[in-house]
Image (cartoon, rainbow, N blue to C red):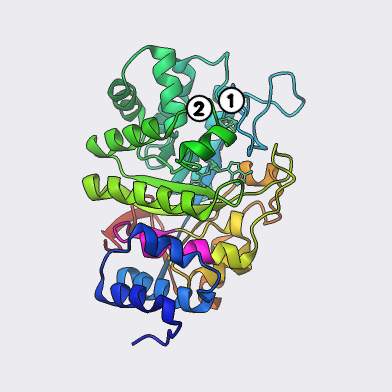
């Protein structure tokens, strides 16, 4: 039995206890400042523990952003560069392979690969990033590209979506990260990323990925020009695709970081705002097994508290992160496994290493193996 007592929360509390789905209006109410954050957290924690018990998952991973040169100019992005900018770069094969070697030397099970859309790069170069790494390091899971990149590849190849996805899978693509989602509602999308793949393309790509047997993640970028209404709309759209395909593994709410962006006048969300969005996400996305508190983005203290506000995963060791650090993140560039485990234990949870597909990782002198699947819908 829960301790929650605020009267306006009572009908929602009853639904959550009974395992019933929350409506659009319920979601909006959860953003009402009259709903006390601790009570919201308690409800989200009920769902979190129902699905994942006391476990908190992490992985050993690294990032690769093969170029930062990008044809688009999303107003929230501090990572992109023009070719003439001093900070612009475009990796060659040796640099890509060196990152793979470094990842394997450090026990990584996953490489997260996304980047800019370089106007001079051919599709074959993007494909080769995947095939080179996959052939040299087949044990390293490649979680790569967002629908924004896949949409670009369709234009470069003049081939349909399914062809591009199958070709990337053939090259070694193992799953897709959740980026490029931002806020789906066109009122907001037109203000922050007008030209890139729209929500229809985003969903079509994830649906196709799921049909082809890939698992994918999903995200929401919050704390810029959107209103609670747009956030709930976003979450419900994700929930609807999940009802159809069951292909999403984890949802990651991404707090906007304003430094060096076209929206630098906006203040970064506060810790309580981050925790509210974490809890609302857990409560609305009743069919997605995991909610990730991405420590790079939240900061370590808030990520620890988030493990009792709906989150059951903190992402991984993370090496070579640029997107958040270019936008002012003050978190370390990476964490050791010992640091991650301590972070989780201090928050009162049990640390469990997982691979990208949420299987328990068993380590021995010989390397690592994926064990049983963890978590439930
Ligand atoms: O799509 C870009 C966001 C995303 C900023 O799938 C920003 O496991 C805040 O998707 N402030 C990329 N956010 C990151 C991403 C991700 C991260 C961690 C794990 C996974 C996963 C996916 O980052 C972009 C955009 O929504 N972003 N710039 C910024 N200034
Ligand atoms: Fe380019 Fe992605 Fe940045 Fe948009 S968010 S400008 S698509 S790198």
Whether residue 130 sits left or right of residue 160 in the image: it is right
Depth check: give the residue in front, 135 or 294. 294
Quarter-of-image position of residue 165: top left
Task: Classify mark 2 as within 8 Å of ligand 2 or not, answering yes or no.
Answer: yes
Q: Which mark is residue 376?
A: none
Crowd rating for badge 1 (residues with CA inside 10 Å; few <14, some 14–19, many 20+): some
* Residue 285 seen in render: no
Determine which residue is flagged by label 1. Answer: 72
Determine which residue is flagged by label 2. Answer: 196
Whether residue 266 sits left or right of residue 211 in the image: it is right
**Extreme right residue here?**
86
- Is label 2 in contact with label 1 (beta carbons under 8 Å)? yes
Per the image, label 1 sits on a secondary structure element best described as loop
Residue 128 in the image, given as x and y percentages of width and height: 45, 22
The reply to whether the magenta stretch includes residue 286 is yes
Q: Is residue 299 above or below residue 220?
A: below
Depth check: give the residue in front, 27 or 61. 27
Crowd rating for badge 2 (residues with CA inside 10 Å; few <14, some 14–19, many 20+): many
Residue beneath the point at 46% across and 82% down: 6
Task: Classify mark 1 as within 8 Å of ligand 2 or not, answering yes or no.
Answer: yes
Residue beneath the point at 29% across and 26% down: 166
Depth check: give the residue in front, 133 or 13. 13
The reply to whether the magenta stretch includes residue 219 is no
Q: CA distance from mark 2 to mark 1?
A: 7 Å
Residue 57 in the image, given as x and y percentages of width and height: 42, 63
Query: Which region shows up in magenta?
Result: 276-291
């Amino acid at each position: 039995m829960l301790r929650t007592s605020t009267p306006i929360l009572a009908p929602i509390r009853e639904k959550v206890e009974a395992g019933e789905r929350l409506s659009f209006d319920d979601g909006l109410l959860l953003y009402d400042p009259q709903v006390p954050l601790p009570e919201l957290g308690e409800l989200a924690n009920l769902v979190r523990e129902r699905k994942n018990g006391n476990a908190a998952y992490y992985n050993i991973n690294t990032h690769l952003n093969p170029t930062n040169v990008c044809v688009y100019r999303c107003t929230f992005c501090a990572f992109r560069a023009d070719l003439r900018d001093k900070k612009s770069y475009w990796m060659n094969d040796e640099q890509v392979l060196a990152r793979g070697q470094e990842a394997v030397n450090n026990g990584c099970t996953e490489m997260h690969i996304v980047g800019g859309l370089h106007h001079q790069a051919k599709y074959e170069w993007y494909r080769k990033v995947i095939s080179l790494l996959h052939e040299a390091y087949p044990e390293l899971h490649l979680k790569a590209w967002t629908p924004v990149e896949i949409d670009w590849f369709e234009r470069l190849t003049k081939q349909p979506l399914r062809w591009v996805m199958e070709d990337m899978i053939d090259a070694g693509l193992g799953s897709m990260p959740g980026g490029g989602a931002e806020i789906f509602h066109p009122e907001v999308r037109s203000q922050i990323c007008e030209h890139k793949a729209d929500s229809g393309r985003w969903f079509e790509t994830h649906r196709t990925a799921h049909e082809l047997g890939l698992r994918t993640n999903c995200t929401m970028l919050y704390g810029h020009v959107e209103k609670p209404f747009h956030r709930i709309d976003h979450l419900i759209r994700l929930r609807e695709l999940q009802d159809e395909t069951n292909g999403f593994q984890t949802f990651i709410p991404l707090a906007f970081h304003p430094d060096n962006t076209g929206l630098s006048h906006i203040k970064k969300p506060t810790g309580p705002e981050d925790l509210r969005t974490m809890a609302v996400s857990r409560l609305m996305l009743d069919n997605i097994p995991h909610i990730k508190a991405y420590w790079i983005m939240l900061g370590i203290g808030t990520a620890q508290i988030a493990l009792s506000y709906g989150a059951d995963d903190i992402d991984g060791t993370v090496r070579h992160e640029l997107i958040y650090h270019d936008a002012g993140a003050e978190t370390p560039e990476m964490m050791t496994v010992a640091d991650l485990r301590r972070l989780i234990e201090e928050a009162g949870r049990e640390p469990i290493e997982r691979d990208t597909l949420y299987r328990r990782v068993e380590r021995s002198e010989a390397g690592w193996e994926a064990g049983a699947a963890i978590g439930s819908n």
